[in-house]
């Protein structure tokens, strides 16, 4: 079963587009995770400071 060059090229392009979409989704998910990990101390420090101020 021979595969013509055009058909093979279309399959490679489809795979490439699928991979690009997957890679973009993965980078977006990693970025969201990093942002959430960075936001935790930014929220926790003032919250703890407020608790200490209220307890004093």
Image (cartoon, rainbow, N blue to C red):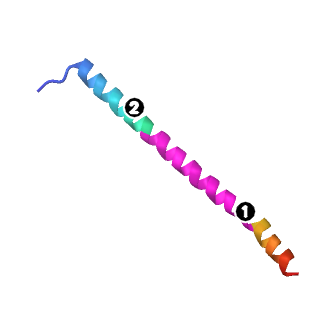
Q: CA distance from mark 1 to mark 2?
A: 39 Å
- Where does the C terminus fall, quadrant-wise? bottom right
* 12 vs 53, nearest the viewer: 53
Give percent across and percent down for residue 46.
79, 66
Where disc 1 sits, the SS reads helix
Residue sitting at x 24%, y 22%: 7
Residue sitting at x 30%, y 23%: 9
Instruction: Say if 27 sits above or below 15 in the image.
Output: below
Give percent across and percent down for residue 24.
49, 40
Q: Which mark is residue 28?
A: none
Instruction: Say if 55 sits above or below 30 in the image.
Output: below
Question: Dot 2: within a 10 Å radius of its alpha carbon, few (fewer than 14), some, or many (20 or more) residues?
Answer: few
Task: Name the residue at the front extreme.
Answer: 54
Residue pointed to by mark 2 = 17
Give percent across and percent down for residue 40.
67, 62
Q: Main secondary structure of the magenta part?
A: helix
- Left or right of 7 in this view: 43: right
Residue pointed to by mark 1 = 43
Magenta-tinted stretch: 22-44
- Left or right of 36 in this view: 42: right
- Residue 37 falls inside the magenta stretch: yes
* 44 vs 37, nearest the viewer: 44
């Amino acid at each position: 079963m021979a595969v013509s060059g055009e058909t093979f090229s279309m399959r490679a392009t489809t795979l490439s587009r699928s991979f690009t979409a997957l890679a973009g989704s993965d980078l977006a998910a990693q970025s969201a995770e990093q942002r959430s990990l960075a936001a935790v101390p930014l929220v926790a420090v003032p919250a703890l400071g407020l608790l200490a101020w209220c307890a004093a």
